[in-house]
């Protein structure tokens, strides 16, 4: 076989392999998110509402800032697998509990309603736009593209909240500068940048 042809063939095979892997990654992350909502809607909505708001059977409101910060993911997983009533509902299945907590309950904070005084676009402009363009595209080298749907699928609202609050690598932390409502409003704004 001529060398040039061999090289081309290798390139094509590599391309096909990387296409297959990216499809698989997309497919499985999607599946994760879907199955968390599915578990919640089939196992939990007898007493909690689909939106996480209080019902006649349970007073807890998963969408408030207070609730979102009151317990860590680990504490919630332990609650679901150890509380006598809830462990029965979830078959003491730790994987299932982790999925519901990380991919559903802890994503409800981004749906919190903000006081009209908070203007996330302005906060973003002031604090973030020297590295992230208002469209979400990166400006600073190595800043992530906030339009990327793969990024959105891999991060819960709580993950995005934590990155903004605590920072990571070259990304500064804003925990001292912005309050929790302001950070949640940025999470909601970033969700709208998704393409
Ligand atoms: C049979 C009714 C019922 C079902 C079904 C149910 N729960 Fe609950 N859950 C409750 C009640 C009651 C409480 C106590 C909170 C309250 O209302 O005061 C509670 C509390 C919780 C809490 C703790 C809140 C806190 O901060 O202490 C979490 C988390 C929770 N439920 C998640 C779930 C999940 C996830 C499912 C589905 C896998 C589920 N629940 C299914 C009735 C139920
Ligand atoms: C000095 C430049 C800089 C500023 C200012 C900045 N970022 Fe970033 N941002 C980065 C970099 C670099 C990364 C990639 C961090 C990493 O994963 O190493 C990043 C990543 C992110 C991510 C993706 C996190 C992830 O887990 O992939 C989000 C969301 C984000 N930034 C939001 C914001 C918001 C909101 C602000 C303003 C409050 C902000 N950034 C301000 C540089 C910046």
Image (cartoon, rainbow, N blue to C red):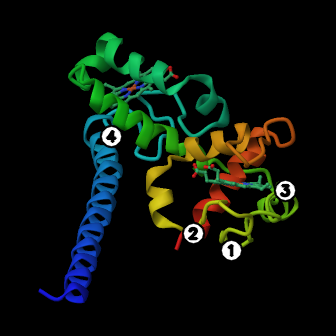
Query: Which of the two discs, 4 and 2, sits closer to the camera?
Result: 2
Q: Secondary structure at mark 3?
A: helix
Q: Is mark 3 within 8 Å of ligand 2?
A: yes
Indicate the position of residue 77 as horizontal and vertical percent values.
40, 23
Left-right relation of 132 to 149: right
Numbered mark located on residue 147 in the image: 2
**Earlier sequence position, callout 3 versus callout 1:** 3
Query: The N terminus is located in which quarter?
Result: bottom left
Distance between mark 4 and mark 2 Cα atoms: 27 Å
Asked whether 80 or 155 is in front, the reply is 155
**Is residue 95 rendered to the left or right of residue 168?**
left
User: Are dots 2 and 3 in contact, CB under 8 Å?
Assistant: no
Query: Disc 2 versus disc 3: distance between alpha carbons?
Result: 18 Å
Which residue is denoted by mark 1 in the rendering?
A: 135
- Mark 1, other Cα within 10 Å: few <14 / some 14–19 / many ≥20: some
Front residue of this view, candidates 56 and 195: 195
Q: Are marks 4 and 3 in contact (CB under 8 Å)?
A: no
- Per the image, the residue denoted by label 3 is 127
Q: Secondary structure at mark 2?
A: loop
The numbered mark at residue 161 is none
Q: Give the mark nearest the N terminus, 2 or 3.
A: 3
Mark 4 to mark 3: distance in Å? 36 Å
Query: Local crowd at mark 4 within 10 Å, few (<14), some, or many (≥20)?
Result: many
């Amino acid at each position: 076989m001529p060398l040039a042809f061999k090289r081309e063939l290798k390139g094509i095979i590599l391309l096909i392999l990387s296409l297959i892997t990216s499809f698989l990654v997309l497919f499985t992350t999607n599946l994760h998110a879907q199955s968390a909502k599915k578990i919640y809607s089939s196992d939990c909505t007898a007493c909690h509402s689909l939106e996480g708001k209080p019902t006649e059977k349970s007073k807890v409101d998963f969408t408030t800032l207070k609730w979102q910060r009151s317990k860590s993911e680990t504490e919630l997983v332990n609650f679901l697998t150890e509380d006598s009533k809830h462990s029965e509902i979830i078959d003491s299945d730790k994987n299932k509990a982790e999925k519901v907590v990380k991919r559903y309950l802890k994503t409800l904070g981004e749906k919190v309603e903000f006081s009209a005084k908070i203007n996330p676009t302005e906060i973003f402009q002031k604090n973030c736009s020297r590295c992230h363009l208002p469209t979400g595209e990166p400006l600073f080298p190595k800043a992530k593209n906030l339009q990327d749907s793969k990024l959105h699928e891999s991060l819960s609202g709580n993950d995005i909240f934590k990155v903004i609050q605590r920072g990571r690598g070259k990304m500064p932390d804003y925990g001292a500068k912005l309050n929790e409502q302001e950070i949640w409003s940025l999470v909601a704004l970033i969700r709208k940048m998704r393409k």
